[in-house]
Image (cartoon, rainbow, N blue to C red):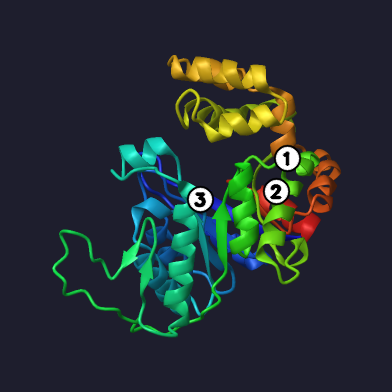
Amino acid sequence: MRLGLNIGYSRSQLGVDLSLVQQADRLGFHSVWTAEAYGSDAVSPLCWIAARTTRIKVGTAIMQIPARTPTLTATTALTLDQLSDGRFLLGLGVSGPQVVEGWHGVPFGKPLLRTREYVEIVRAVWRREKPLEFKGTYYEIPYTGPDATGLGKPLKSILHGRPDIPIYLAAIGPRNVALAAEIADGWLPVFFAPDRMSVWREHLEAGFRAAGGGKSLAGFDVAPTVPVMLGSDVDACRVAVKPRLALYVGGMGARGKNFYNELVTRYGYEADAKRIQDLYLGGKKEEAAAAVPDALVDEVALCGPKERIRERLPRWKSSGVTTLICGAVQPEALELMAELVL
C-alpha cells in the first residue's frame, strides 16, 4: 500500500501548506492531490506544488468534468505532465447537480454517459492517432450545431505527450463505481469504509468484466482519501473529523439527491443520515456535526493516538486499498503514516 496526501480546496482564503507537501515528498509519499468545489481550482495549486517538489506525483482529486471541455482537460494534463517530468495523475468527477447547474450553469443530465464520452475524448487527444472527431450525446467535435459557423475542422494536439497518463474517477454510486472500474486506471472514493468492501466489490467486478482483457483489482488503483487525526484524546480527534462528514452528508446536495447521504445510508446509518441532513439544512451545522456517530467516524477515518492508528490500519491494507490518500494537516501524522506503511 502506498501513501498520498490530499490538501483539499480553499476556504475564503487560499493557502497551500508547502512544508507539509515537501515533507510528504521527502518521506516517500506516492502522490499529492488537490481539489475544487466552487472556490479555488484544482490545477493552479498543483502547478505551484509541482514546481516545488521533486519525486511525488501530483494529481487532481478532482477536476470537475462539467467545468471544462474534454479537449482542454486533455491538454492541461499533457502540459502539467511535461512540466512535472511525468508526475501527473488526472482525477475526474462530475460533482453534483447543485454545483453543476448552480455554479457551472450547465445541465447535470446523465453523468455516466457524460463521463464515458469525456474520458474517450481525453484519451483520443493523448493518442494523436488522427485529427479529433467525435459525435456523442454531450460532445460533438467539430461542432456542427444550428449556430455553428461551419468553419470548424478536426485538429490534433500540437503538444505531444504520454498517451497513458493515469485517469482516476471519483465515484460512490454503484453505477459510477462500475464505470470507474471499466474505463479508468484508478478509483477515488470518499468516506471509504474498509470493512464494507462488500458494498463495492460487485460493482467493481461488473466494471472489470465490461472492460474485458482480464482487468481486475490487481492492476487497478483503489485510492480513497482517509482523514487522519493524531492525538491522545480519541474523542477530540473524532470531533475534528465530524464537521466535514456533516457538511457532505447533510449539506452537499438536496433532500433526495445527496450522494454522500445515500452512501452512509448504504453503510447502515439511515436514521443518522436523515438527522444530520435535517439539522444541517435547518442551519444547525454544529448540531449536525455532533449528530455524526462515533462509529461512522471510526469506519472512515484514522483517529487517536499512535497505538490506536497502528491497530486499526491493517483493515485498510487488507481491504484492497492500494493508495491511502491521507487527509491530514499534522506533520506528525505524516511521519506516523510513513513509519507504519512505507
Instruction: Looking at the image, tell me whether mark 1 or mark 3 is earlier in sequence order.
Output: 3
Within 10 Å of disc 1 (Cα), the crowding (few <14, some 14-19, many 20+) is many
Q: Which residue lies most toward the front here?
A: 146
Q: Where is residue 41 in the image (x, y as percent from the top left)?
A: 38, 53
Q: How far apart are marks 1 and 3 (CA)?
A: 23 Å
Residue designated by label 3: 112
Q: Where is residue 10 in the image (x, y as percent from the top left)?
A: 41, 45
Figure check: 139 above or below 129: above
Residue at 70%, 63% (x, y): give it.
220
Within 10 Å of disc 3 (Cα), the crowding (few <14, some 14-19, many 20+) is some
Q: With 223 as the anchor, is 63 left or right in this view? A: left
Q: Nearer the viewer, residue 283 or 201?
A: 201
Q: Which of 124 and 113 is in front in this view?
A: 113
Q: Given contact means CB atoms under 8 Å apart, are the residues at marks 1 and 2 in contact?
A: no
Q: Position of residue 256 (x, y in %)?
A: 50, 25
**Total numbered labels placed on residues in the image:** 3
Within 10 Å of disc 2 (Cα), the crowding (few <14, some 14-19, many 20+) is many
The amino acid pointed to by label 2 is: His
The amino acid pointed to by label 1 is: Ala
Residue designated by label 1: 193
Residue at 40%, 40% (x, y): give it.
11
**Quarter of the image with the C terminus in it:** bottom right
Q: Nearer the viewer, residue 85 or 212?
A: 212
Element on which disc 3 rests? helix
Figure check: 268 above or below 330: above
Instruction: Looking at the image, tell me whether mark 1 or mark 2 is earlier in sequence order.
Output: 1
The amino acid pointed to by label 3 is: Leu
